[in-house]
Image (cartoon, rainbow, N blue to C red):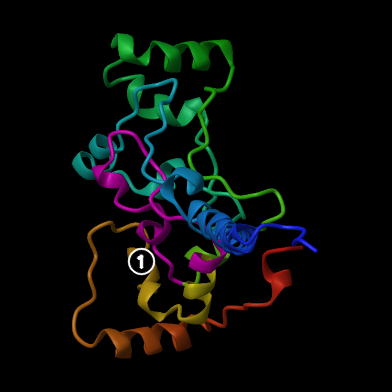
Amino acid sequence: MSALFPPWSNTVSKASIVCTVLGLVGFFAFLFLWVRSPIFTGQDGPTEQPVQFDHRHHVADDGIDCRYCHDTVDKSFTAGIPPTAVCMNCHSQIWNRSPFLDPVRASYFENKPIPWKRVHFLPDFVYFNHAIHVNKGVGCVTCHGRVDRMALVMQQAPLTMDWCLDCHRDPGPNLRPKELITNMTWQPEGDRLALAKQLIAQYDVHPRTSCTTCHR
């Protein structure tokens, strides 16, 4: 009796199994790398704003503290978007006829907020509190990068769960004296490990890594 399948069908079957396994492995490997890529996490992409606001000028040149505009960053879970009145504190006198500031003046006199675009996004199921981080000595530059060098602010950190947990498991390297929270150029002097231990004790830093810390 002749064979039901020709001999070469065994080779085809084995090749099909190998290709299927490799395809599945490759697919999940692609997903694993994709969700960690800058394209997916939103890193390094400048966000166009309705007003040509240059952080380099305001932060680096003029030395304006982050908390002047983001005045709830050490008091609330959100850093706060500055109302137009804050802009006009200076620009009612400085560059008060510049066409670049037409949207700011229109917002102020029409009593309508400037539609700023969000730069840093977290999923709705993630809870993040700015105040607790700032008051424990985590500097702005740790998460937001060198804003003083950005013409258009962009997301520098991946903001992934791994990235957050790395800091919660070892917060020491990201801590600094609270009076230097907004200093973009600060670098520790002397023994970095000793300073980290000192700040952890001084600010009573006990970061949590349980799921309910961020997923409430």
Query: In this view of the protein, which residue sits in the foreground, 63 or 24?
Result: 24
The quadrant of the picture occupied by the C terminus is bottom right
At which x and y percent is residue 65?
34, 48
At which x and y percent is residue 50?
44, 20
At which x and y percent is residue 117?
51, 30
Q: Determine the image quadrant of residue 64.
A: top left
At which x and y percent is residue 141?
35, 57
Vertical side of 11 occupied by 208: above or below: below
Q: How crowded is mark 1: few (under 14 residues within 10 Å), some or many (20 or more)?
A: few
Residue 205 in sight: yes
Describe residue 196's horizontal placement relative to residue 112 as left or right: left
Q: Residue at coordinates 48% horizontally, 57% vertically from top-left?
A: 33
Describe residue 166's horizontal placement relative to residue 27 as left or right: left
- Which residue in the structure is indicated by mark 1? 179
The segment highlighted magenta reads 137-163
Vertical side of 46 occupied by 197: above or below: below
The quadrant of the picture occupied by the N terminus is bottom right
Q: Residue at coordinates 22% horizontally, 44% vertically from top-left?
A: 60
Query: In this view of the protein, which residue sits in the foreground, 147 or 121?
Result: 121
Q: Determine the image quadrant of residue 127.
A: bottom right
Residue 63 in sight: no
Q: Is mark 1 on a helix, strand or loop?
A: helix
Q: Does the magenta stretch include residue 146?
A: yes
Q: Residue at coordinates 54% horizontally, 23% vertically from top-left?
A: 115
Describe residue 101's horizontal placement relative to residue 135 as left or right: left
Q: Which residue lies furthest to the right in this view?
A: 1
Looking at the rendered structure, the kind of residue marked 1 is: Glu
